Image (cartoon, grey):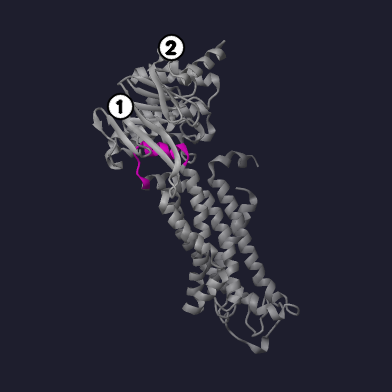
Amino acid sequence: MLEIIELHKRYRSNWLTGRGHQAVEPATFHIAEGESLGLVGESGSGKSTLARLLLKLISADGGRILYKGTDISGYSLKQMRPLRRELQIMFQHPHSALNPRRTLLDSLLEPVLLHRIMNKAAAREKALALLDVVGIRAELLPRYPHQISGGQIQRIVIARALMLEPKFLVLDEPTSMLDVSVQAQVTQLLQRIRKEFGLTYLFISHDLELVRHMCDRIGVMKEGRIVELDESERIMERPQHPYTKQLVNAFQAFKQ
Amino acid sequence: MKMSYRAAAGLLAFVLLASLLAPLLAPYDPNQINMAQRLAPLSSVHWLGTDTLGRDVLSRILYGGRVSIVLALAVTLATMLVGLLLGTISGYAGGWIDEAIQIVVSIFQGLPGLALMLAIAGTLGPGVKSLFVALLFTSWADFSRVVRGEVMKIREESYVEGTRALGAGHVYIIGRHMLPNLLGPLIVLFTIRIGRVILSIASLSFLGLGLQPPAADWGVMVNDARPYFRSYPHLMIAPGLCIAAVSLCINWLGDGLRDKLDTRTEKEHSLL
């Protein structure tokens, strides 16, 4: 479904001397339709940058992105627009995920109104149906983001993404800022939705247990490089790269 | 809203209305010289007395408010528009566009305000026009700095990136997501600035760069009254009090509006 070839990005801190750091080393991998690919690695390892590169939210220095076989790396903002419906992203921080000055209803309707897919009444109906799916009561809709909990916001964000009927969803540590009990609920919801709507996930996290649980394959990132990418079970049972071994061992030790 | 905000809004509305209706309310022509009645004390004929040329102080205050307030509003609005435009572009675009704009901003911030105003007045000749240009030139830079900072802060919020991921254009993001969130800080800035502009107009008029003496203006009146302050303090106190009251009310009102506009503090304030 999505294929990445030699995609890379460097951040320059000084444009005179050209000093900077390589955020993402040339990365090559693919995500199959219906698959869930996990990306693990410590903070600053380039997971989020890589995800934003492949959604073209930030521009890459080089490399190609193939979506359903078409090279979209050179697409302009306008050319990307129809594709934006199919490619969505969910962020880590619930408190900044929604505009604080808009009601939840406004935020929910925004995607379809922006794309002019349906009128307001139809959009409202669809929103109510999706709220049912994510388990949020309709009474919350006139409220503002600061008036509901982080878990509720993330559910709203999921419903908002589903409004556009996406095919591919990037989940950038969607549960890391939530309480453990809420984390489990949101994780379950994400799994259910994936089946129900036939979605493809790129799941970013630093929680190996969670990624193993959620994903078919796992990519391990360190210092901007994907050091190992394999099926989840194989990564957990027979890690090849020293860094992966270290991660898996630390995780096993923590479990006992 | 709390009581103090209502009181401030009420007083401000009263002053504005009185200024606008000055031709109807003023008992005398503000520029009518009457040497027989010069420096008259407060009385039923001249409620606030008369000045050195026998002009009725109350009438001059009513007319003077029009100039001070209207000019201050116009200058502040113009400053805000320029600052908002350049600050938003600078903060939103980033990169070399930001750097180029910031160089210009730094130059303007580095220029000594008074010297620049003198130069402008010297070229354009004293009057309302040069006042306007001088105040605009010396204050837009500060405004744009603050706006830039706020825009940069909002740009990093997830919902802005999320809106980009929805396929929204820059104009949509700035208009629908940035400006509404800028409103709170802007109103506070506006009120702080307008109070200062009223004072600036007064001080520039004192230097002979702004409004010229026959005109009825609060700043001009304070300066006219300066030599007589010891014997006839009411000549300075009346317009001085107007300047202070108006700036104070605008500041209070700004505080109230900011709290009202900020959805996050809504709850806390309803408890007060």
Say whether residue B157 is magenta: yes
Residue A238 is marked as 2
Chain letter of disc 2 in the image = A
Residue span colored magenta:
B156-170
For label 2, the crowd category at 10 Å Cα-Cα, with few meaning under 14, some 14 to 19 and many 20 or more, is few
Q: Residue at x 51, y 55 (%)?
A: B145
Q: CA distance from mark 1 to mark 2?
A: 27 Å
Q: What amino acid is labelled 2 in the image?
A: Arg
- Residue A239 appears at what percent x and percent y? 44, 15
Q: Residue at x 43, y 45 (%)?
A: A18
The tag earlier along the polypeptide, 1 or 2, is 1
Query: In the rendered image, is residue A29 in sight?
Result: yes
Q: What amino acid is labelled 1 in the image?
A: Leu
Q: Which residue is mark 1?
A: A2
Against A65, residue B6 (above or below) is below
Say whether residue A222 is magenta: no
For label 1, the crowd category at 10 Å Cα-Cα, with few meaning under 14, some 14 to 19 and many 20 or more, is some
Quadrant location of residue A133? top left
- Residue A170 appears at what percent x and percent y? 39, 28
Chain letter of disc 1 in the image = A
